[in-house]
Image (cartoon, coloured by chain):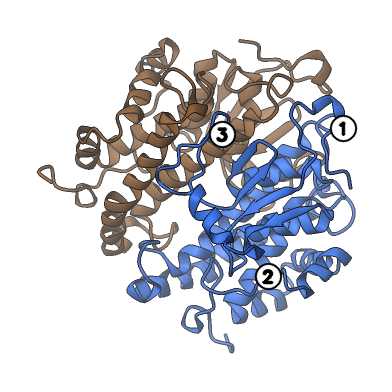
Chain colours: A blue, B brown
């Protein structure tokens, strides 16, 4: 997989490894970037596995940081450094990486594909990552879960009953549509980073709401969706990554398992 | 302002007006697309002003729609049709439009700029649009505000006290940074669609939380931010658009004015 841009597009030296700047200790939003880099076999460094890595994160998001000559400061990680480019925002980083690491068509081959893939990734991140986070922080990200537990119960109930079927049904339709092409993937018959995003969201949801996810999978209504999940999980590089120490355990991030927010096993 | 892609990039005929597919009756997320098209003087149609326009929206998001040969179905409006391309997700549509209508550098002139601009737009949409919406729907988008009023009061208080200063402070830093260049704009010394996004967010917030916004503006801590707001508002094409009937009034959308969610005028 080529990791350097073609000579024509190269303006500054980017023939260097990608640098992921993200919190150590949990998969979080950084995981979407890791899965893309791992699937591509791209060279990258990760502050999660560097001594004092957290200091790099904190320096980037310091409220005195005004960026540099080329780059505005980032508000929050994940942050990707590549040569003199500094990027933030998960879907933005993925969109940059996609055509460069073989997880989206290059513009010269198909100039519209990246927008279709990006639309799918944004929808998965909205509904299955950001909203999943809000189930345990519906009032304020700055407060503890325990301080918004009652609101969380209401929110999680609605999320499981209404939002998950809405988003799962949507992706099931995408997979049934002609634009998805052959095979288990969302777009154009090839694995793209949107598939990896969807995989990671489903994996996190399985951790957070095991009973609800078991029921939804067992219903058979989202067969293609869970086939996509299994197909990603069996990719040789993804499989090796998931079994490695680089894959971190879910903890106090987006996906948290609070049994009182899941449905009953018998439901 | 050129609205057709350069010959080199043209693969299908896209020398046709843009078609915005969005709910009639409120600015909503569609407004970000409208402001970009209006500032560029681009030709476009808008279902908000078409007889039976709502039927076009409903057909697109019908849960039987599986898209076409090229395009996955959209989950929700805004949707942009351009030739045979159908796009959804606000930041995605803007990113497509930006270089085509002169609101972001073209990749051949500066291949990294679009990612920096997109990062800024995503951050504004996250914090100042999506989170603003959640202040009146913290529990469930499917429930009425009245059914989540108490949770809304807690959420809005936190939003005004903690989130607005965080995001306003961030954009103030961006504007102070070197990458913003000369003049009132966020990136590279030129107006980009990210400036228009930020303008629309501030405009909506001024409607939703007039007391809080007056205090925050009066504090002088976010001088560059409000200068950007004023500078966008004075752009001749934006000014004409805002005074036209095409600009719709805030109603039951993202930005809603519930006096009980704003702070007291004397605060």
Q: Name the residue located 59 percent from the left edge and 34 percent from the top edge.
A: B116
Q: Kindly report the distance in space between the C-alpha atoms of the residues bearing marks 3 and 1.
A: 29 Å
Determine whether the residue tagged by mark 3 lies in a helix, strand or loop. Answer: loop
Nearer to the camera, A176 or A12: A12
Q: Earlier in the sequence, mark 3 or mark 1?
A: 3
Label 3: how many Cα within 10 Å (few below 14, some 14–19, many 20+): many
The x and y percentages for residue A48 are: 63, 63
The numbered mark at residue A109 is 1
Kindly identify which chain the residue marked by label 1 belongs to. Answer: A
- A267 vs A216: above or below: below
Q: Does residue A149 appear left or right of residue A235 in this picture? A: left
Are the residues at dot 1 and dot 2 in contact (C-beta closer than 8 Å)?
A: no
Give a yes or no on whether discs 3 and 1 share a subunit: yes
Q: Kindly report the distance in space between the C-alpha atoms of the residues bearing marks 1 and 2.
A: 32 Å
Q: Which residue is mark 3?
A: A71
Label 2: how many Cα within 10 Å (few below 14, some 14–19, many 20+): some
Q: Name the residue located 61 percent from the left edge and 70 percent from the top edge.
A: A205
Determine whether the residue tagged by mark 1 lies in a helix, strand or loop. Answer: loop
Q: Which residue is mark 2?
A: A203
Label 1: how many Cα within 10 Å (few below 14, some 14–19, many 20+): few
Q: Does residue B33 appear left or right of residue B151 in this picture? A: right
Which is in the foreground here, disc 3 or disc 2?
Answer: 3
């Amino acid at each position: 997989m080529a990791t350097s841009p073609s000579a024509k597009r190269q303006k500054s030296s980017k023939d260097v490894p990608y640098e992921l700047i993200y919190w150590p200790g949990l998969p979080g939003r950084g995981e979407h970037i890791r899965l893309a880099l791992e699937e591509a076999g791209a060279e990258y460094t990760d502050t999660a596995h560097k001594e004092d890595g957290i200091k790099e994160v904190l320096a980037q998001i310091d409220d005195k940081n005004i960026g540099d000559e080329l780059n505005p400061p980032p508000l929050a990680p994940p942050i990707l450094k590549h040569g003199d480019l500094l990027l933030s925002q998960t879907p933005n980083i993925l969109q940059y990486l996609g055509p460069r690491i073989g997880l989206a068509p290059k513009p010269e081959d198909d100039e519209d594909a990246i927008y279709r893939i990006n639309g799918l990734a944004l929808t998965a991140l909205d509904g299955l990552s950001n909203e999943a986070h809000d189930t345990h922080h519906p009032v304020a990200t700055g407060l503890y879960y325990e301080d918004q537990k009652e609101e969380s119960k209401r929110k999680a109930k609605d999320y499981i009953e209404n939002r998950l079927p809405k988003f799962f049904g949507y992706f099931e339709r995408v997979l049934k549509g002609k634009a998805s092409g052959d095979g288990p993937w969302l777009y154009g018959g090839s694995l793209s980073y949107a598939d990896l995003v969807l995989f990671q969201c489903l994996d996190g949801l399985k951790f957070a709401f095991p009973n609800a996810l078991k029921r939804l999978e067992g219903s058979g209504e989202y067969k293609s969706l869970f086939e996509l999940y299994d197909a990603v999980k069996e990719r040789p590089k993804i499989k090796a990554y998931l079994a490695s120490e680089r894959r971190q355990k879910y903890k106090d991030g987006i996906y948290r398992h609070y049994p009182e927010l899941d449905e009953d096993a018998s439901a």
